[in-house]
Amino acid sequence: MDDWAPLWLSLRVAGLATVAAGSLGVAFAYVLAKGRFRGRGLLEAAVTLPIVLPPTVLGYYLLTTLGVNSPIGRAWERAFGEPLVFTVGAAVIAASVSALPFVVRTARAAIEAVDPRLEAAARVAGLTEWRVARHVTLPAARRGLAAGVALGFARALGDFGATVMVAGNIPGRTQTLPIAVYDAVQAGDDDTARAGSLVLAAIAVAVLVAINAAARPRTS
Amino acid sequence: MTAPPIPPAPGTRPASPLTVDVTVSAGRFSVSADFAAHPGVTLLFGPSGAGKSLTLAAVAGLLRPDRGTITLHGTVVADAGAGVHVPTQQRRLGMVAQSAALLPHRSPRDNVALAVASGTRAERRRRAGQHLDAVGAAHLAAAPTSGLSGGEQQRVALARALAGRPRLLLLDEPFSALDRPTRTRLRALVRRIVDDHHLPALLVTHDLDDAVVADRVVRFEPGATVGQDDLDRGRPDRLAHLVGLGEPWASGCSG
């Protein structure tokens, strides 16, 4: 493979998407794990939806939400002078939405697994709910949070369907590595397809190995 | 450091530090507790599963009672009928449970410093050091928290409990996971803290030996309190007589 632009673009998109889905996902996970409010079930369903929806359907809805005729799309165009769809920004949004449920589900399980006695002791000691979250719950759940963010990164890096719907397949602009692999297969360019697939698979394996290593508590 | 208690006006009784008259539930189990705590150490004594810890959790504000009221130093902190529930954080309590519940990712000093209510980071850490010193754990300030022995953990937990300047100390079987010599030392430490700070304390236990540090006992049977009595620290065997465990040979010989 002689053009590595799709790899660098993929890493950039996945990196930004990981920041977005990571911070948003941990916040959602905390609210879902701790909150008791009306509409919690609905919120949970909404953030989980990207796992079960066909990626193209997810992409279609994103396209409708962010497109030039949508309020968000129009507001974006007024502010930045160009449409949001078929840009790197749209690719980042598609990857973030695809990655979000993986962060939320993993992080939520980690937050719920924190020993409630630690939190109770902190509350009795006078820590506000915000400080309990910051100093007790989230640090105690940090391995699970890291695993969730890593899974989110892997998912964001690999997104194809949603990204191609909202960001298109513009070589050098929005063509991420998974899309470049698809293109290469279509064009009969076996070398490029093989190299791109190998890189993506290697990164995925590395992420999974790192998650497993982090999940094992260090023995002292 | 701690202000001496305000002497009551002549002819009036000081308000009880704590009065409890509640029903608390967890799942299908519920306990009805009715007692008042006095200055000094009040045992909540009874068999495992009687509802002592559940009662303590309601006093701490970690559970809302189904019925009744809890009054702390004259302030109603829980009233199920009126929907009053003062958040745990505002009740100014110190708690030490069977598990010390220290944060494993922070040093003992940081664990205590987090409970210091105000001040810069440096001031909090300095205060934490003083509290650790007061429980004989100054040398553990920077030790790895996960490497502390059971007794060391409970000392740090006591320091943390004191760091919030509590008005009431809640002790939920704090000695039960410790070996006998450590238990004896920590009992003496708790007694000294209670006396030095004029701090009322509730001590949940099913261990008759804890009577040596107690001034009073609230007796629990499964699901309810059944009475309260004064104890004499000089005569710790009184508790055994009260709960019918004294002179176990007596019934056998009389028949």
Image (tube, rainbow, N blue to C red):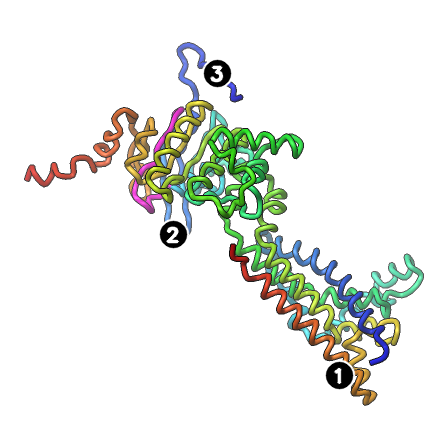
Is residue A151 visible to the viewer in this orientation of the structure?
yes
Image coordinates for residue A147, horizontal then vertical, percent: 62, 62
Residue at the spot 66% in from the left edge and 66% down from the top edge: A151
**Main SS category, magenta section:** loop
**Residue B158: x, y in percent?**
47, 35
Q: Which residue is mark 2?
A: B28
As drawn, is B152 to the left or to the right of B237? right
Q: Which mark is residue A194?
A: 1
Q: Which residues are magenta?
A: B38-52
As displayed, is residue A198 above or below residue B112?
below
Count up the numbered dots: 3
Q: Position of residue B202 (x, y in %)?
A: 40, 33
Residue sticking out furthest to the right: A81
The three-letter code of the residue at mark 3 reads Ile
Q: Quadrant of the N terminus of chain A?
A: bottom right
Mark 2 element type: loop
Check if mark 3's residue and mark 2's residue have beta carbons within 8 Å.
no
Q: Do discs 3 and 2 share a chain?
A: yes
Residues beneath discs 1 and 3 located on the same chain: no
The amino acid type of the residue labelled 1 equals Arg
The chain containing the residue under callout 1 comes to A
Q: Which mark is residue B6?
A: 3
At label 2, which amino acid type do we have? Arg
